[in-house]
Amino acid sequence: MIADLLHARPDGVQEAVALVDAVDDALLHGLARLDDERAGALESLAAAFSGSPLADRVADSVGKLIAGTVTDEHLAALAGARSALLGAAHDALLAGVDAALGRTREPWSATAVPADAGRLSAGARSWLRELAIAGWRGADHEVAGGGAQTVQALLADPSARRLAVLLDGFAAELRAAAPVATLQRVPVRRWADLWARALLLSQDGFAGHDAVPVDGRLLILGVDLHEHPTVFRAQAHGLLETTGGVRLVRASVAAAKVDTINGPSAWRMLAAFPVLLKALAEQRVVQVGGMALTPGGDLLWEEARAGAGEPADPFAIARIRLGAATAASAPPLDRHPAAIAEPVLLEGCAAGQDSFDLGGATVAVDRDRLPVAGPLTPALIAASTACLGLLRWDGGRWAVQPLAVQALVKRKPVTVHTGDWALGPTEAKAAKAEAAVGTAVDVLRERAGRLLRK
Amino acid sequence: MTENGIAYERRSAAPVITPVQPRRLAKVPFVELAEGRLQGVVSSASRVYVSSITAGDHGLSCNTNNNRPCGGLGGTRPCNHIGALIDAAVAQYGLDRVTRYLKVTLPDGGQDIRAALHAKAAPNRAPEVFSSFLRHLAYLELPPTVEPLPELQWFPATAATPR
Protein backbone atom coordinates (compact mmCIF):
# COMPACT_ATOMS: atom_id res chain seq x y z
CA MET A 1 0.00 0.00 0.00
CA ILE A 2 1.28 3.43 -0.95
CA ALA A 3 -0.07 4.78 2.37
CA ASP A 4 2.66 2.78 4.16
CA LEU A 5 5.30 4.52 2.10
CA LEU A 6 3.96 7.96 2.92
CA HIS A 7 4.26 7.31 6.63
CA ALA A 8 7.75 5.77 6.39
CA ARG A 9 10.87 7.82 7.08
CA PRO A 10 13.78 5.81 5.67
CA ASP A 11 16.91 5.91 7.85
CA GLY A 12 19.61 8.29 6.78
CA VAL A 13 17.89 10.00 3.85
CA GLN A 14 17.51 13.30 5.65
CA GLU A 15 21.11 13.18 6.88
CA ALA A 16 22.43 12.37 3.39
CA VAL A 17 20.48 15.25 1.89
CA ALA A 18 21.82 17.60 4.59
CA LEU A 19 25.38 16.72 3.53
CA VAL A 20 24.44 17.33 -0.10
CA ASP A 21 23.34 20.81 0.96
CA ALA A 22 26.98 21.59 1.79
CA VAL A 23 28.02 21.02 -1.83
CA ASP A 24 24.98 22.82 -3.19
CA ASP A 25 25.56 25.85 -1.00
CA ALA A 26 29.22 25.99 -2.07
CA LEU A 27 28.14 25.92 -5.72
CA LEU A 28 25.60 28.67 -5.09
CA HIS A 29 28.23 31.07 -3.84
CA GLY A 30 31.15 29.81 -5.90
CA LEU A 31 34.27 27.90 -4.91
CA ALA A 32 36.24 31.11 -5.28
CA ARG A 33 34.30 32.52 -2.33
CA LEU A 34 34.25 29.77 0.30
CA ASP A 35 33.95 31.32 3.74
CA ASP A 36 34.72 29.46 6.99
CA GLU A 37 31.17 28.26 7.45
CA ARG A 38 30.94 26.77 3.96
CA ALA A 39 34.43 25.29 4.25
CA GLY A 40 33.32 23.69 7.52
CA ALA A 41 30.26 22.20 5.85
CA LEU A 42 32.44 20.67 3.13
CA GLU A 43 34.76 19.24 5.79
CA SER A 44 31.74 17.57 7.42
CA LEU A 45 30.94 16.06 4.05
CA ALA A 46 34.48 14.68 3.78
CA ALA A 47 34.26 13.35 7.33
CA ALA A 48 31.08 11.46 6.46
CA PHE A 49 33.04 9.51 3.85
CA SER A 50 35.71 8.31 6.27
CA GLY A 51 35.76 4.55 6.17
CA SER A 52 34.30 4.45 2.66
CA PRO A 53 36.30 3.66 -0.49
CA LEU A 54 36.05 7.36 -1.44
CA ALA A 55 37.46 8.57 1.93
CA ASP A 56 40.95 9.63 0.83
CA ARG A 57 39.98 11.17 -2.47
CA VAL A 58 37.11 13.17 -0.99
CA ALA A 59 39.15 14.39 2.00
CA ASP A 60 42.08 15.35 -0.20
CA SER A 61 39.90 17.10 -2.78
CA VAL A 62 37.85 19.01 -0.23
CA GLY A 63 41.08 20.17 1.42
CA LYS A 64 42.48 21.36 -1.91
CA LEU A 65 39.23 23.07 -2.93
CA ILE A 66 39.09 24.92 0.39
CA ALA A 67 42.70 25.98 -0.13
CA GLY A 68 41.70 27.43 -3.49
CA THR A 69 43.02 24.77 -5.90
CA VAL A 70 40.10 23.99 -8.21
CA THR A 71 41.15 21.21 -10.59
CA ASP A 72 39.05 18.81 -12.67
CA GLU A 73 40.17 15.95 -10.44
CA HIS A 74 39.05 17.63 -7.20
CA LEU A 75 35.74 18.64 -8.75
CA ALA A 76 35.15 15.08 -9.96
CA ALA A 77 35.67 13.83 -6.40
CA LEU A 78 33.23 16.43 -5.07
CA ALA A 79 30.60 15.51 -7.68
CA GLY A 80 31.26 11.84 -6.99
CA ALA A 81 30.72 12.26 -3.25
CA ARG A 82 27.49 14.16 -3.83
CA SER A 83 26.26 11.52 -6.28
CA ALA A 84 27.15 8.70 -3.89
CA LEU A 85 25.03 10.28 -1.15
CA LEU A 86 22.06 10.81 -3.45
CA GLY A 87 22.53 7.31 -4.88
CA ALA A 88 22.24 5.91 -1.36
CA ALA A 89 19.15 8.04 -0.71
CA HIS A 90 17.68 6.71 -3.97
CA ASP A 91 18.25 3.11 -2.84
CA ALA A 92 16.62 3.69 0.55
CA LEU A 93 13.62 5.44 -0.98
CA LEU A 94 13.17 2.83 -3.69
CA ALA A 95 13.42 0.01 -1.14
CA GLY A 96 10.50 1.69 0.60
CA VAL A 97 8.54 1.79 -2.67
CA ASP A 98 9.20 -1.87 -3.36
CA ALA A 99 8.16 -2.85 0.16
CA ALA A 100 4.99 -0.75 0.01
CA LEU A 101 3.95 -2.00 -3.43
CA GLY A 102 5.22 -5.54 -3.03
CA ARG A 103 7.36 -4.98 -6.12
CA THR A 104 10.14 -7.38 -7.00
CA ARG A 105 13.32 -5.74 -8.28
CA GLU A 106 16.20 -7.52 -9.92
CA PRO A 107 19.49 -6.58 -8.26
CA TRP A 108 22.02 -4.80 -10.48
CA SER A 109 24.51 -7.28 -11.92
CA ALA A 110 25.63 -5.90 -15.29
CA THR A 111 29.30 -5.42 -16.03
CA ALA A 112 30.47 -1.95 -16.93
CA VAL A 113 31.79 -1.45 -20.44
CA PRO A 114 34.12 1.57 -20.45
CA ALA A 115 33.37 4.01 -23.24
CA ASP A 116 36.06 5.44 -25.49
CA ALA A 117 37.72 8.53 -24.11
CA GLY A 118 35.67 11.43 -25.41
CA ARG A 119 37.87 14.00 -27.06
CA LEU A 120 35.17 16.63 -26.51
CA SER A 121 34.57 16.12 -22.82
CA ALA A 122 37.57 18.24 -21.79
CA GLY A 123 35.69 21.28 -23.09
CA ALA A 124 32.67 20.36 -21.00
CA ARG A 125 34.81 19.91 -17.87
CA SER A 126 36.44 23.24 -18.42
CA TRP A 127 33.09 25.10 -18.58
CA LEU A 128 31.78 23.19 -15.55
CA ARG A 129 34.92 24.24 -13.67
CA GLU A 130 34.36 27.89 -14.58
CA LEU A 131 30.79 27.60 -13.33
CA ALA A 132 31.85 26.03 -10.05
CA ILE A 133 34.41 28.76 -9.41
CA ALA A 134 31.97 31.58 -10.21
CA GLY A 135 29.03 29.90 -8.46
CA TRP A 136 25.46 30.39 -9.61
CA ARG A 137 25.50 33.84 -8.00
CA GLY A 138 28.46 34.76 -10.18
CA ALA A 139 26.91 33.44 -13.40
CA ASP A 140 26.60 36.48 -15.65
CA HIS A 141 25.80 36.40 -19.38
CA GLU A 142 29.41 35.55 -20.22
CA VAL A 143 29.81 32.64 -17.79
CA ALA A 144 26.35 31.31 -18.63
CA GLY A 145 27.09 31.40 -22.34
CA GLY A 146 30.63 30.04 -21.95
CA GLY A 147 29.69 26.46 -22.81
CA ALA A 148 28.04 27.22 -26.16
CA GLN A 149 30.86 26.04 -28.43
CA THR A 150 31.38 22.86 -26.44
CA VAL A 151 27.68 22.04 -26.61
CA GLN A 152 27.59 22.57 -30.39
CA ALA A 153 30.54 20.23 -30.82
CA LEU A 154 28.99 17.60 -28.55
CA LEU A 155 25.66 17.77 -30.41
CA ALA A 156 27.44 17.02 -33.66
CA ASP A 157 28.82 13.78 -32.20
CA PRO A 158 26.10 11.10 -31.90
CA SER A 159 28.05 9.22 -29.22
CA ALA A 160 28.00 12.32 -27.00
CA ARG A 161 24.26 12.95 -27.26
CA ARG A 162 23.50 12.21 -23.62
CA LEU A 163 25.96 14.81 -22.30
CA ALA A 164 25.03 17.25 -25.09
CA VAL A 165 21.30 17.14 -24.30
CA LEU A 166 21.95 17.65 -20.59
CA LEU A 167 24.41 20.52 -21.04
CA ASP A 168 22.22 22.23 -23.61
CA GLY A 169 19.22 22.23 -21.25
CA PHE A 170 21.36 23.34 -18.31
CA ALA A 171 23.03 26.13 -20.30
CA ALA A 172 19.66 27.40 -21.55
CA GLU A 173 18.48 27.76 -17.96
CA LEU A 174 21.60 29.63 -16.92
CA ARG A 175 21.29 31.93 -19.94
CA ALA A 176 17.63 32.60 -19.19
CA ALA A 177 18.44 33.33 -15.55
CA ALA A 178 21.61 35.39 -16.10
CA PRO A 179 22.74 37.51 -14.41
CA VAL A 180 21.81 35.13 -11.59
CA ALA A 181 22.94 37.66 -8.96
CA THR A 182 19.69 39.56 -9.60
CA LEU A 183 17.48 36.44 -9.45
CA GLN A 184 15.14 36.23 -6.45
CA ARG A 185 15.00 32.46 -6.15
CA VAL A 186 17.83 30.23 -7.32
CA PRO A 187 17.11 26.54 -8.07
CA VAL A 188 20.03 25.47 -5.89
CA ARG A 189 19.37 21.72 -5.72
CA ARG A 190 18.45 21.45 -9.37
CA TRP A 191 21.51 23.20 -10.78
CA ALA A 192 23.82 21.28 -8.49
CA ASP A 193 22.16 18.05 -9.72
CA LEU A 194 22.66 19.01 -13.35
CA TRP A 195 26.20 20.23 -12.77
CA ALA A 196 27.25 17.11 -10.87
CA ARG A 197 25.69 14.73 -13.40
CA ALA A 198 27.27 16.59 -16.31
CA LEU A 199 30.64 16.46 -14.60
CA LEU A 200 30.38 12.69 -14.14
CA LEU A 201 29.27 12.20 -17.74
CA SER A 202 32.24 14.21 -18.97
CA GLN A 203 34.78 11.95 -17.24
CA ASP A 204 36.74 10.00 -19.85
CA GLY A 205 35.56 6.42 -20.06
CA PHE A 206 32.17 6.90 -18.36
CA ALA A 207 30.86 3.33 -18.39
CA GLY A 208 28.03 1.94 -20.50
CA HIS A 209 26.36 -1.48 -20.35
CA ASP A 210 25.59 -4.09 -22.97
CA ALA A 211 21.99 -4.56 -24.04
CA VAL A 212 20.53 -7.96 -25.00
CA PRO A 213 17.90 -8.67 -27.68
CA VAL A 214 14.43 -9.63 -26.44
CA ASP A 215 11.19 -10.89 -28.02
CA GLY A 216 7.75 -10.41 -26.57
CA ARG A 217 4.65 -8.29 -26.16
CA LEU A 218 4.95 -4.74 -24.87
CA LEU A 219 1.86 -3.65 -22.94
CA ILE A 220 2.06 0.12 -22.54
CA LEU A 221 0.88 1.65 -19.25
CA GLY A 222 1.38 5.26 -20.19
CA VAL A 223 3.78 7.83 -21.55
CA ASP A 224 5.81 10.47 -19.75
CA LEU A 225 6.85 13.54 -21.76
CA HIS A 226 10.11 15.42 -21.30
CA GLU A 227 11.11 18.69 -22.82
CA HIS A 228 13.61 21.54 -22.70
CA PRO A 229 14.12 24.23 -25.33
CA THR A 230 16.00 21.94 -27.71
CA VAL A 231 14.60 18.47 -27.02
CA PHE A 232 11.24 16.69 -26.87
CA ARG A 233 11.05 13.13 -25.60
CA ALA A 234 8.29 10.58 -25.15
CA GLN A 235 9.13 7.85 -22.65
CA ALA A 236 6.64 4.98 -22.53
CA HIS A 237 6.39 2.86 -19.39
CA GLY A 238 5.11 -0.64 -19.96
CA LEU A 239 5.20 -4.33 -19.21
CA LEU A 240 7.24 -6.60 -21.43
CA GLU A 241 5.89 -10.14 -21.54
CA THR A 242 8.58 -12.58 -22.53
CA THR A 243 8.94 -16.33 -22.06
CA GLY A 244 11.05 -15.45 -19.03
CA GLY A 245 8.27 -13.49 -17.28
CA VAL A 246 6.84 -9.99 -17.12
CA ARG A 247 9.19 -7.06 -16.72
CA LEU A 248 8.65 -3.35 -16.15
CA VAL A 249 10.41 -1.53 -18.99
CA ARG A 250 10.64 1.87 -20.64
CA ALA A 251 10.93 2.79 -24.32
CA SER A 252 12.07 6.28 -25.23
CA VAL A 253 12.23 8.36 -28.37
CA ALA A 254 13.68 11.87 -28.38
CA ALA A 255 14.01 14.51 -31.07
CA ALA A 256 15.97 17.73 -31.19
CA LYS A 257 13.80 20.82 -31.64
CA VAL A 258 13.86 24.55 -30.95
CA ASP A 259 12.01 26.54 -28.30
CA THR A 260 9.35 27.84 -30.70
CA ILE A 261 8.21 24.27 -31.36
CA ASN A 262 6.28 23.23 -28.25
CA GLY A 263 2.92 22.10 -26.98
CA PRO A 264 1.09 19.47 -29.08
CA SER A 265 3.18 20.44 -32.16
CA ALA A 266 6.24 18.89 -30.55
CA TRP A 267 4.86 15.43 -31.42
CA ARG A 268 5.50 16.30 -35.08
CA MET A 269 9.21 16.07 -34.34
CA LEU A 270 8.81 12.36 -33.52
CA ALA A 271 7.31 11.47 -36.92
CA ALA A 272 10.15 8.99 -37.48
CA PHE A 273 8.44 6.62 -35.00
CA PRO A 274 4.98 5.91 -36.47
CA VAL A 275 4.58 2.50 -34.82
CA LEU A 276 5.24 3.83 -31.34
CA LEU A 277 3.09 6.94 -31.86
CA LYS A 278 0.18 4.80 -33.10
CA ALA A 279 0.54 2.48 -30.12
CA LEU A 280 0.48 5.49 -27.78
CA ALA A 281 -2.39 7.32 -29.44
CA GLU A 282 -4.57 4.22 -29.81
CA GLN A 283 -3.41 2.26 -26.73
CA ARG A 284 -2.21 -0.71 -28.72
CA VAL A 285 -0.09 -3.68 -27.78
CA VAL A 286 3.31 -3.74 -29.48
CA GLN A 287 4.98 -6.95 -30.64
CA VAL A 288 8.74 -6.64 -30.39
CA GLY A 289 11.23 -9.00 -31.99
CA GLY A 290 14.95 -8.85 -31.30
CA MET A 291 14.78 -5.39 -29.74
CA ALA A 292 17.67 -4.52 -27.42
CA LEU A 293 16.91 -4.25 -23.69
CA THR A 294 19.45 -2.62 -21.37
CA PRO A 295 20.11 -4.02 -17.89
CA GLY A 296 18.48 -0.83 -16.53
CA GLY A 297 15.15 -1.78 -18.13
CA ASP A 298 15.27 0.46 -21.21
CA LEU A 299 14.14 -0.94 -24.55
CA LEU A 300 16.21 0.68 -27.30
CA TRP A 301 13.34 1.37 -29.66
CA GLU A 302 13.63 0.22 -33.27
CA GLU A 303 10.63 0.77 -35.52
CA ALA A 304 11.65 -2.14 -37.72
CA ARG A 305 11.54 -4.48 -34.72
CA ALA A 306 8.11 -3.32 -33.54
CA GLY A 307 4.58 -3.92 -34.78
CA ALA A 308 1.42 -2.32 -33.36
CA GLY A 309 -1.17 -4.97 -32.49
CA GLU A 310 -4.65 -4.99 -30.97
CA PRO A 311 -5.90 -2.28 -28.59
CA ALA A 312 -5.24 -2.96 -24.89
CA ASP A 313 -6.59 -0.87 -22.03
CA PRO A 314 -3.70 0.33 -19.83
CA PHE A 315 -5.95 0.30 -16.74
CA ALA A 316 -6.84 -3.34 -17.34
CA ILE A 317 -3.15 -4.15 -17.87
CA ALA A 318 -2.21 -2.41 -14.64
CA ARG A 319 -4.98 -4.13 -12.65
CA ILE A 320 -4.10 -7.61 -13.85
CA ARG A 321 -0.38 -7.59 -14.56
CA LEU A 322 1.44 -4.71 -12.83
CA GLY A 323 1.49 -6.34 -9.40
CA ALA A 324 3.50 -9.34 -10.55
CA ALA A 325 5.94 -7.53 -12.86
CA THR A 326 9.65 -7.49 -12.05
CA ALA A 327 11.38 -4.12 -12.08
CA ALA A 328 14.99 -3.44 -13.11
CA SER A 329 17.59 -1.64 -11.02
CA ALA A 330 19.06 1.62 -12.23
CA PRO A 331 22.68 1.71 -13.44
CA PRO A 332 24.84 2.71 -10.44
CA LEU A 333 25.73 6.23 -11.59
CA ASP A 334 22.14 6.99 -12.64
CA ARG A 335 20.82 6.50 -9.10
CA HIS A 336 19.28 9.69 -7.73
CA PRO A 337 15.96 10.34 -5.97
CA ALA A 338 14.83 12.45 -8.96
CA ALA A 339 15.27 9.41 -11.22
CA ILE A 340 12.59 7.45 -9.36
CA ALA A 341 9.52 7.11 -11.60
CA GLU A 342 7.62 3.98 -10.55
CA PRO A 343 4.35 3.13 -12.32
CA VAL A 344 1.44 2.86 -9.88
CA LEU A 345 -2.31 2.44 -10.14
CA LEU A 346 -4.48 4.43 -7.72
CA GLU A 347 -8.06 3.25 -7.39
CA GLY A 348 -10.84 3.83 -4.92
CA CYS A 349 -9.25 6.97 -3.54
CA ALA A 350 -10.72 10.43 -3.35
CA ALA A 351 -9.12 12.73 -5.90
CA GLY A 352 -8.57 16.46 -5.59
CA GLN A 353 -6.67 18.88 -7.82
CA ASP A 354 -3.66 18.79 -5.52
CA SER A 355 -3.74 15.39 -3.88
CA PHE A 356 -5.22 11.90 -3.72
CA ASP A 357 -6.73 10.81 -0.42
CA LEU A 358 -5.72 7.21 0.03
CA GLY A 359 -7.65 6.75 3.25
CA GLY A 360 -5.36 7.55 6.15
CA ALA A 361 -2.77 9.28 3.98
CA THR A 362 -2.68 11.74 1.12
CA VAL A 363 -0.24 11.78 -1.76
CA ALA A 364 0.35 14.98 -3.71
CA VAL A 365 -0.44 15.31 -7.42
CA ASP A 366 2.72 16.38 -9.26
CA ARG A 367 1.02 19.15 -11.22
CA ASP A 368 4.33 20.48 -12.55
CA ARG A 369 4.53 17.38 -14.70
CA LEU A 370 1.32 17.86 -16.65
CA PRO A 371 2.36 18.39 -20.27
CA VAL A 372 0.72 20.83 -22.67
CA ALA A 373 1.22 18.22 -25.40
CA GLY A 374 -1.48 15.98 -23.93
CA PRO A 375 -5.12 16.30 -22.85
CA LEU A 376 -4.72 15.64 -19.09
CA THR A 377 -5.83 18.62 -16.99
CA PRO A 378 -6.06 19.34 -13.25
CA ALA A 379 -9.86 19.30 -13.59
CA LEU A 380 -9.83 15.78 -15.06
CA ILE A 381 -7.53 14.62 -12.28
CA ALA A 382 -9.84 16.10 -9.66
CA ALA A 383 -12.76 14.25 -11.29
CA SER A 384 -10.87 10.95 -11.53
CA THR A 385 -12.00 7.64 -10.14
CA ALA A 386 -8.75 5.88 -11.08
CA CYS A 387 -5.30 7.15 -11.95
CA LEU A 388 -2.30 5.50 -13.60
CA GLY A 389 0.78 7.44 -12.76
CA LEU A 390 4.42 7.60 -11.81
CA LEU A 391 5.41 7.74 -8.17
CA ARG A 392 8.14 10.35 -7.72
CA TRP A 393 10.12 11.90 -4.89
CA ASP A 394 11.31 15.49 -4.90
CA GLY A 395 12.11 18.08 -2.27
CA GLY A 396 11.53 15.58 0.53
CA ARG A 397 8.09 14.29 -0.35
CA TRP A 398 6.34 11.74 -2.55
CA ALA A 399 4.01 12.77 -5.36
CA VAL A 400 2.12 11.03 -8.16
CA GLN A 401 2.49 12.25 -11.72
CA PRO A 402 -0.69 11.19 -13.54
CA LEU A 403 -0.18 9.51 -16.94
CA ALA A 404 -3.84 8.54 -17.43
CA VAL A 405 -7.12 8.92 -15.56
CA GLN A 406 -10.55 7.40 -15.61
CA ALA A 407 -12.94 10.16 -14.66
CA LEU A 408 -16.57 11.15 -14.58
CA VAL A 409 -17.30 14.15 -16.77
CA LYS A 410 -20.93 15.28 -16.75
CA ARG A 411 -21.70 11.89 -15.20
CA LYS A 412 -20.21 10.05 -18.15
CA PRO A 413 -17.10 7.91 -17.73
CA VAL A 414 -14.09 9.06 -19.78
CA THR A 415 -10.53 7.78 -20.02
CA VAL A 416 -7.74 10.23 -20.87
CA HIS A 417 -4.05 9.43 -21.48
CA THR A 418 -1.04 11.77 -21.91
CA GLY A 419 -0.31 10.03 -25.21
CA ASP A 420 -3.77 10.54 -26.72
CA TRP A 421 -2.46 13.35 -28.94
CA ALA A 422 0.61 11.48 -30.20
CA LEU A 423 -0.83 11.58 -33.74
CA GLY A 424 -2.29 15.10 -33.27
CA PRO A 425 -4.88 16.56 -30.87
CA THR A 426 -8.15 14.62 -30.83
CA GLU A 427 -10.09 17.51 -29.34
CA ALA A 428 -11.41 20.08 -31.87
CA LYS A 429 -10.24 23.27 -30.16
CA ALA A 430 -6.75 21.93 -29.49
CA ALA A 431 -6.52 20.57 -33.04
CA LYS A 432 -7.34 23.98 -34.47
CA ALA A 433 -4.76 25.70 -32.27
CA GLU A 434 -2.17 23.09 -33.20
CA ALA A 435 -2.88 23.51 -36.91
CA ALA A 436 -2.34 27.29 -36.61
CA VAL A 437 1.08 27.12 -34.94
CA GLY A 438 2.13 23.64 -36.03
CA THR A 439 3.22 25.14 -39.34
CA ALA A 440 6.19 26.48 -37.33
CA VAL A 441 7.78 23.09 -37.85
CA ASP A 442 7.29 23.34 -41.63
CA VAL A 443 8.49 26.95 -41.78
CA LEU A 444 11.71 26.14 -39.93
CA ARG A 445 12.32 22.89 -41.82
CA GLU A 446 11.93 24.74 -45.10
CA ARG A 447 14.40 27.44 -44.00
CA ALA A 448 16.81 24.81 -42.74
CA GLY A 449 16.59 22.96 -46.04
CA ARG A 450 17.31 26.11 -47.98
CA LEU A 451 20.03 27.62 -45.80
CA LEU A 452 21.90 24.61 -44.48
CA ARG A 453 22.02 22.42 -47.61
CA LYS A 454 23.05 24.87 -50.31
CA MET B 1 7.06 30.82 -2.17
CA THR B 2 6.63 27.11 -1.85
CA GLU B 3 4.72 24.51 -3.78
CA ASN B 4 2.72 22.58 -1.19
CA GLY B 5 5.33 23.43 1.42
CA ILE B 6 8.35 22.39 -0.67
CA ALA B 7 10.94 25.12 -1.08
CA TYR B 8 11.82 25.95 -4.70
CA GLU B 9 15.50 25.83 -3.77
CA ARG B 10 15.25 22.19 -2.66
CA ARG B 11 13.47 20.78 -5.69
CA SER B 12 15.37 18.83 -8.35
CA ALA B 13 12.60 19.43 -10.87
CA ALA B 14 12.07 23.12 -10.07
CA PRO B 15 10.88 24.89 -13.24
CA VAL B 16 13.33 27.56 -14.39
CA ILE B 17 12.43 28.65 -17.91
CA THR B 18 8.96 29.93 -18.62
CA PRO B 19 7.91 27.94 -21.70
CA VAL B 20 7.77 30.21 -24.75
CA GLN B 21 4.39 30.94 -26.26
CA PRO B 22 3.69 29.41 -29.65
CA ARG B 23 3.59 32.04 -32.40
CA ARG B 24 3.50 32.15 -36.19
CA LEU B 25 7.02 32.11 -37.55
CA ALA B 26 6.61 33.12 -41.19
CA LYS B 27 7.55 36.81 -40.71
CA VAL B 28 10.03 36.52 -37.85
CA PRO B 29 11.37 32.96 -37.94
CA PHE B 30 13.97 33.53 -35.24
CA VAL B 31 14.22 35.60 -32.07
CA GLU B 32 16.59 35.18 -29.14
CA LEU B 33 17.78 36.95 -26.03
CA ALA B 34 21.48 36.17 -26.21
CA GLU B 35 24.95 37.68 -26.07
CA GLY B 36 23.52 40.74 -24.37
CA ARG B 37 21.14 41.46 -27.23
CA LEU B 38 17.60 40.92 -28.39
CA GLN B 39 18.31 39.67 -31.87
CA GLY B 40 16.65 37.86 -34.69
CA VAL B 41 15.80 37.42 -38.32
CA VAL B 42 12.95 39.23 -40.06
CA SER B 43 11.59 38.40 -43.52
CA SER B 44 10.41 41.41 -45.45
CA ALA B 45 9.38 41.41 -49.11
CA SER B 46 11.93 39.08 -50.66
CA ARG B 47 14.76 40.12 -48.33
CA VAL B 48 16.01 38.73 -45.05
CA TYR B 49 16.93 41.32 -42.41
CA VAL B 50 19.02 40.64 -39.35
CA SER B 51 18.09 42.98 -36.52
CA SER B 52 19.30 43.50 -32.97
CA ILE B 53 18.99 45.73 -29.91
CA THR B 54 21.70 45.68 -27.26
CA ALA B 55 20.64 45.24 -23.64
CA GLY B 56 21.17 48.29 -21.44
CA ASP B 57 22.30 50.91 -23.95
CA HIS B 58 19.77 49.98 -26.68
CA GLY B 59 22.15 50.03 -29.62
CA LEU B 60 20.13 49.32 -32.78
CA SER B 61 21.37 47.47 -35.79
CA CYS B 62 19.54 46.23 -38.89
CA ASN B 63 21.12 44.86 -42.05
CA THR B 64 20.29 42.37 -44.75
CA ASN B 65 21.97 39.02 -44.39
CA ASN B 66 24.36 40.27 -47.11
CA ASN B 67 25.39 43.09 -44.76
CA ARG B 68 23.59 45.88 -46.59
CA PRO B 69 22.32 48.47 -44.10
CA CYS B 70 18.55 48.74 -43.71
CA GLY B 71 17.26 51.94 -45.31
CA GLY B 72 14.52 52.30 -42.70
CA LEU B 73 16.85 52.56 -39.74
CA GLY B 74 17.49 56.29 -39.42
CA GLY B 75 19.99 56.87 -36.65
CA THR B 76 18.17 56.21 -33.39
CA ARG B 77 14.67 55.58 -34.75
CA PRO B 78 13.83 51.85 -34.86
CA CYS B 79 12.88 50.57 -38.32
CA ASN B 80 9.86 48.35 -38.97
CA HIS B 81 12.06 45.25 -38.85
CA ILE B 82 13.16 46.08 -35.33
CA GLY B 83 9.50 46.76 -34.52
CA ALA B 84 8.56 43.30 -35.81
CA LEU B 85 11.46 41.79 -33.85
CA ILE B 86 10.20 43.37 -30.61
CA ASP B 87 6.63 42.20 -31.27
CA ALA B 88 7.80 38.65 -31.93
CA ALA B 89 9.98 38.67 -28.80
CA VAL B 90 7.07 39.86 -26.65
CA ALA B 91 4.79 37.20 -28.18
CA GLN B 92 7.41 34.53 -27.51
CA TYR B 93 8.87 35.48 -24.14
CA GLY B 94 6.28 37.82 -22.64
CA LEU B 95 6.70 41.53 -21.94
CA ASP B 96 8.38 41.08 -18.55
CA ARG B 97 11.24 38.93 -19.71
CA VAL B 98 12.00 41.16 -22.71
CA THR B 99 11.97 44.40 -20.70
CA ARG B 100 14.09 42.82 -17.95
CA TYR B 101 16.64 41.61 -20.48
CA LEU B 102 16.86 44.88 -22.41
CA LYS B 103 16.71 46.93 -19.19
CA VAL B 104 13.79 48.96 -20.51
CA THR B 105 11.71 50.95 -18.03
CA LEU B 106 8.08 51.16 -19.11
CA PRO B 107 5.70 53.72 -17.62
CA ASP B 108 3.10 52.14 -15.29
CA GLY B 109 0.82 49.96 -17.41
CA GLY B 110 2.89 50.76 -20.50
CA GLN B 111 3.51 48.10 -23.14
CA ASP B 112 5.36 49.97 -25.88
CA ILE B 113 9.00 48.92 -25.72
CA ARG B 114 9.75 50.76 -28.95
CA ALA B 115 8.78 54.10 -27.46
CA ALA B 116 10.72 53.42 -24.26
CA LEU B 117 14.09 52.69 -25.93
CA HIS B 118 16.80 55.29 -25.47
CA ALA B 119 18.26 54.16 -28.72
CA LYS B 120 21.56 54.79 -30.45
CA ALA B 121 23.22 53.29 -33.48
CA ALA B 122 25.22 50.12 -32.95
CA PRO B 123 27.72 48.19 -35.08
CA ASN B 124 26.41 45.65 -37.61
CA ARG B 125 25.90 42.28 -35.92
CA ALA B 126 24.34 40.52 -38.90
CA PRO B 127 27.08 37.87 -39.34
CA GLU B 128 26.94 36.73 -35.68
CA VAL B 129 23.16 36.78 -35.50
CA PHE B 130 22.77 34.96 -38.79
CA SER B 131 25.20 32.25 -37.64
CA SER B 132 23.13 31.93 -34.50
CA PHE B 133 20.02 31.45 -36.70
CA LEU B 134 21.79 28.75 -38.67
CA ARG B 135 22.81 26.96 -35.45
CA HIS B 136 19.18 27.21 -34.35
CA LEU B 137 17.99 25.64 -37.63
CA ALA B 138 20.64 22.93 -37.36
CA TYR B 139 18.70 21.40 -34.44
CA LEU B 140 16.02 20.39 -36.94
CA GLU B 141 18.60 18.41 -38.87
CA LEU B 142 19.83 16.35 -35.92
CA PRO B 143 18.72 12.70 -36.02
CA PRO B 144 16.32 11.56 -33.30
CA THR B 145 17.67 9.26 -30.62
CA VAL B 146 16.33 6.24 -28.71
CA GLU B 147 18.98 6.38 -25.97
CA PRO B 148 17.47 6.32 -22.47
CA LEU B 149 18.85 9.84 -21.63
CA PRO B 150 18.19 9.47 -17.86
CA GLU B 151 18.82 13.17 -17.22
CA LEU B 152 15.58 14.10 -18.97
CA GLN B 153 13.79 13.10 -15.74
CA TRP B 154 14.91 16.58 -14.61
CA PHE B 155 13.11 18.17 -17.57
CA PRO B 156 9.38 17.39 -17.45
CA ALA B 157 7.28 18.72 -20.32
CA THR B 158 5.23 21.25 -18.44
CA ALA B 159 3.38 24.52 -18.52
CA ALA B 160 4.74 25.30 -15.05
CA THR B 161 6.56 28.59 -14.62
CA PRO B 162 9.31 29.48 -12.15
CA ARG B 163 8.18 30.90 -8.82
Image (spheres, coloured by chain):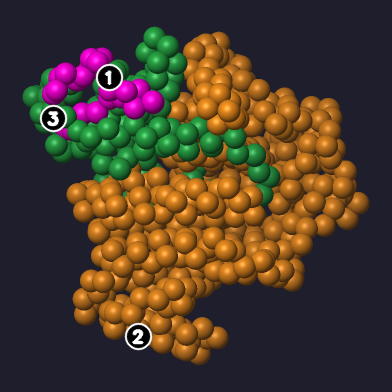
Secondary element type, mark 1: loop
Q: What amino acid does circle 3 point to? A: Lys
Image point 41% across, 86% down: which residue?
Answer: A59
Of marks 3 and 2, the one in the foreground? 3
Q: What amino acid does circle 2 point to? A: Gly
Considering depth in this image, is B23 or A150 the residue closer to the camera?
Answer: A150
Q: Which mark is residue B120?
A: 3
| Image: A390 above or below A18 | above
Asked if residue A346 is among those painted magenta in the image, a careful observer would answer no
Q: Chain of mark 1?
A: B
Image point 30% across, 71% down: which residue?
Answer: A31
The chain letter of the green chain reads B
Q: The C terminus of chain A lies in which quarter of the figure? A: top right
Badge 1: residue crowd in 10 Å (few <14, some 14–19, many ≥20)? some
Residue A173 is left or right of residue A292, and the answer is left
Q: CA distance from mark 1 to mark 3?
A: 15 Å
* Magenta segment: B58-80
Q: What amino acid does circle 1 point to? A: Cys
Q: Chain of mark 2?
A: A
Q: Which residue is mark 2?
A: A63
Of marks 2 and 1, the one in the foreground? 1
Q: CA distance from mark 3 to mark 2?
A: 51 Å
Secondary element type, mark 2: helix
Considering depth in this image, is B127 or A424 the residue closer to the camera?
Answer: B127
Q: Which residue is outermost to the right?
A: A243
Marks 1 and 3, the one that precedes in the sequence: 1
